[in-house]
Image (spheres, rainbow, N blue to C red):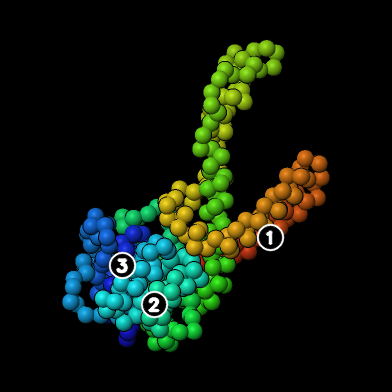
Amino acid sequence: MSPIRRVVVIGCGLIGTSVACALRRAGVRVELADHDPWALAQAARMGAGTALRAGAGPADVVVIATPPSSVAAVLREAQARGLGRVYTDVASAKTRILAEVERGGCDLSCYVPGHPMAGREVSGPGAARAGLFEGRTWALCPHPALSPRALRTVAALATACGAEVRLLAPDAHDRAAAAVSHLPLVLSAALAARFATGAQGGPAEPAPGGETGMETGMETGTEMDRDAGGLSLAAGALRDVTRVAGSPAGMWRDILAHNATPVADLLDELTRDLSRVAAALRAADDGPVAEVLARGNEGHARIVRALSRTREAERAAS
């Protein structure tokens, strides 16, 4: 029998509401809290749970599904109110939050840092899905002060949501999350930003032969700029690479601030690769270009194999 019968979820965004819906589907009683009455009401209407009421006693688990910068304060308040026996969070950075929790005087013995490796590029309770975590990895990050019972309880919660639990040290988690989640978001945003604005205007430059682009039917460079870099030519590759650039900017500023060093280190490594490719292209030296493309093929094959295993696990769980 699952040790979890009642859970409080604080934060009714995409992840918090998805956790609540998954637990409700597993037969767990869920109560919800959010500073935004609209988000709370929408999550409740979706069947994610009922609004938290005072005096209900401690829940088996309290899930803190708030932005990284508020986790420590929310945990401190929840523990002071005695909302639960065990506490966890779902933020995608762990080392800095754990340090903030410790400085805040929280009880670390019952706090299990967690991060379900799932999400969508849309936010809010309306985007929540009960099956969001099926077959996905749910990282738990034990620390020296943590009680084994608390870890087992949160592992059971993740399993009830359909996820596969993986234990990682907080710093190892942050390096991995930087590589597979945070860096791709920054790269996607940086590429999409190239198309955010066009040229400032001005007359079209004459096309070859003294004619304008309108006269020849040929689009000039300035006209391409007005089309935000030639988006009329865009196809699937650009859409695929920039998909996550539509994620909420405010949320991601907070995430990146809480995992700044691992992300910055990876950006430095990538910048060196890109600089080598740029220099090689200018020098008509295809050696470095071929090397990066070959390594890209190798890395892509590993990514495809890893994602195939995830999809197989999702199908098995459904």
Quadrant placement of the N terminus: bottom left
Of circles 1 and 2, the one toward us is: 2
The residue to which callout 2 is attached is 105
For marks 3 and 1, give the one nearer the viewer: 3
In the picture provided, is 71 more to the left or to the right than 170?
left
Q: Quadrant of residue 135?
A: bottom left
Mark identifier at residue 10? 3
Residue 50 at x, y percent in the picture:
21, 67
Q: Who's the residue at 42% across and 86% down the image?
A: 147
| Among numbered discs 3 and 2, the one appearing first in the sequence | 3
Q: Position of residue 19 (x, y in %)?
A: 35, 68
The amino acid type found where label 2 is placed reads Gly
Up/down of 119 relative to 135, above or below:
above
Please state which of residues 36 and 235 is positioned toward the viewer in this rendering: 36
Question: Separation of disc 3 and disc 1 at Cα?
Answer: 42 Å
Q: Residue at x 23, y 57 (%)?
A: 37
The residue carrying mark 1 is: 298
N-term mark: 3 or 1: 3
Residue 117 visible in the shown view: no
Name which residue lies at 39% across and 67% down.
Answer: 71
Secondary structure under tag 3 reads: strand
Q: For mark 3, does the 10 Å Cα neighbourhood hold few (<14), some (14 to 19), or many (20 or more) residues? A: many
Disc 1 on helix, strand or loop? helix
Q: Secondary structure at mark 2?
A: loop
**Above/below status of 207 relative to 169:** above
How crowded pointer 1 is (Cα within 10 Å; few <14, some 14-19, many 20+) is rated as few
- Identify which residue is drawn at 43% across, 74% down: 103
x then y, percent, for residue 192: 53, 43
- Relative horizontal placement of residue 159, taking residue 169 as reference (left or right): left
In the image, residue 282 sits, relative to residue 65, either above or below, namely: above
Upstream in sequence: badge 1 or badge 2: 2
The picture places residue 307, in percent across and down from the top left corner, at: 54, 64
